[in-house]
């Protein structure tokens, strides 16, 4: 799992690359939470486009970040449009509560 | 496809989640599955192995055994641990139920296995372990997308 993060105003943009499973989810979660605190980010965008695998541990990770950020009135968006990720995202019902965009530009405009 | 069989045993370390699903996917590749079918199998294996690590052995060291059998265009995969077993199987299989909410588990493991495979059976015995038996039929359409 390769993680890159950048801050745009009050938005933490996280790009995930590789495989998101139980093994990689734990360190990924810690890095994201640390960045949110350090940068004081209000909103978060998780870019899942470069993931080659995601299981329900990824769903748990997204749900957990969503809960934390919405408690502070922030927003969490995901960028997807990837066959490895979309099926489980839809199945989990996560897309009923979280907004997903195919491109970063549209997500940044709407946040 | 003539009958084929494989068996794999490994330690219940989270590093092995990726290893085990790749091995099973490589075995299943003989059936010439689509990318989506292969991805479904990998995800189901990952869920079963993760369950064994977190719940079966509660992060302790134990053996996880995977057996896969190909018969015709059907693959049967058994993921087995020898850990503590599932106390309330009915509850464990409910979508979104997790016995470990503090670990940010989504409670979707069995639902994923059920959805992504054609058939799912779970056998569990307190303090003896859990056996998950899953099958998937690989559609052998001549013009299927690869």
Image (cartoon, coloured by chain):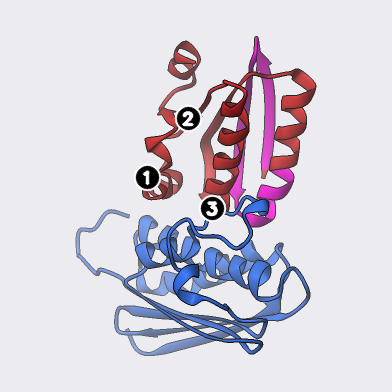
Which quadrant holds the N terminus of chain B? bottom left
Query: Color of chain B here?
Result: blue
Circle nearer the viewer, 1 or 3: 3
B84 above or below A111? below
Q: Secondary structure at mark 1?
A: helix
- Asked whether the residues under the numbered discs 1 and 3 touch, taking CB atoms below 8 Å apart as contact, a structural biologist would say no
Q: Chain of mark 2?
A: A
Q: Over which residues does the magenta segment extend?
A: A2-28
**What residue would you read off at disc 1?**
A90
Which one is in front, B9 or B88?
B88
Which one is in front, A69 or A79?
A69
Q: Disc number at residue A46?
A: none
Image quadrant in which you'd find residue B46:
bottom right
**What residue would you read off at disc 2?**
A79
Q: Residues within 10 Å of mark 2 (few under 14, many from 20)?
A: many
B112 above or below A41? below
Q: Is residue A5 left or right of residue B96?
A: right
Q: Is residue A26 magenta?
A: yes
Tell me how far mark 1 sits from mark 3, CA to CA. 14 Å
Which one is in front, B108 or B144?
B108
**What residue would you read off at disc 3?**
B106
Q: Which residue is located at x 63 percent, y 33 percent?
A: A68
Q: Residues within 10 Å of mark 3 (few under 14, many from 20)?
A: many
Q: Secondary structure at mark 3?
A: loop
Q: Is residue B90 left or right of residue A48?
A: left
Q: Secondary structure at mark 2?
A: strand
Q: Chain of mark 3?
A: B
Which chain is displayed in red in the rendered image? Answer: A
Image quadrant in which you'd find residue B8:
bottom right
Q: Is residue B139 magenta?
A: no
């Amino acid at each position: 799992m390769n993680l890159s993060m950048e801050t745009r105003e009050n938005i933490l943009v996280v790009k995930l690359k590789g495989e998101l499973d139980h093994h990689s989810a734990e360190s990924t979660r810690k890095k994201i939470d640390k960045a949110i605190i350090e940068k004081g980010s209000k909103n978060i965008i998780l870019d899942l486009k470069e993931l080659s695998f995601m299981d329900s541990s990824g769903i748990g990770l997204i749900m957990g970040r969503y809960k934390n950020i919405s408690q502070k009135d922030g927003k969490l968006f995901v960028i997807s449009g990837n066959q490895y990720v979309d099926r489980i995202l839809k199945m989990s019902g996560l897309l009923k509560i979280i907004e997903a965009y195919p491109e970063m530009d549209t997500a940044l405009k709407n946040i | 496809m003539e009958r084929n069989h494989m068996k794999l045993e490994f330690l219940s370390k989270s590093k092995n989640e990726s290893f085990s699903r790749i091995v099973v996917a490589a075995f299943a590749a003989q059936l010439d599955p689509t990318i989506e079918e292969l991805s479904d199998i990998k995800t189901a294996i990952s869920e079963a192995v993760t369950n064994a690590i977190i719940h079966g052995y509660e992060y302790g060291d134990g053996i996880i055994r995977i057996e896969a059998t190909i018969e015709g265009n059907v693959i049967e995969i058994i993921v087995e641990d020898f850990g503590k077993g599932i106390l309330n199987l009915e509850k464990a299989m409910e979508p979104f139920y997790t016995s470990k909410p503090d670990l940010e588990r989504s409670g979707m493991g069995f639902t994923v296995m059920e959805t992504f495979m054609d058939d799912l059976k779970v056998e569990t015995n307190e303090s003896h372990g859990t056996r998950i038996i899953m099958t998937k039929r690989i559609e052998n359409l001549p013009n299927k997308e690869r």
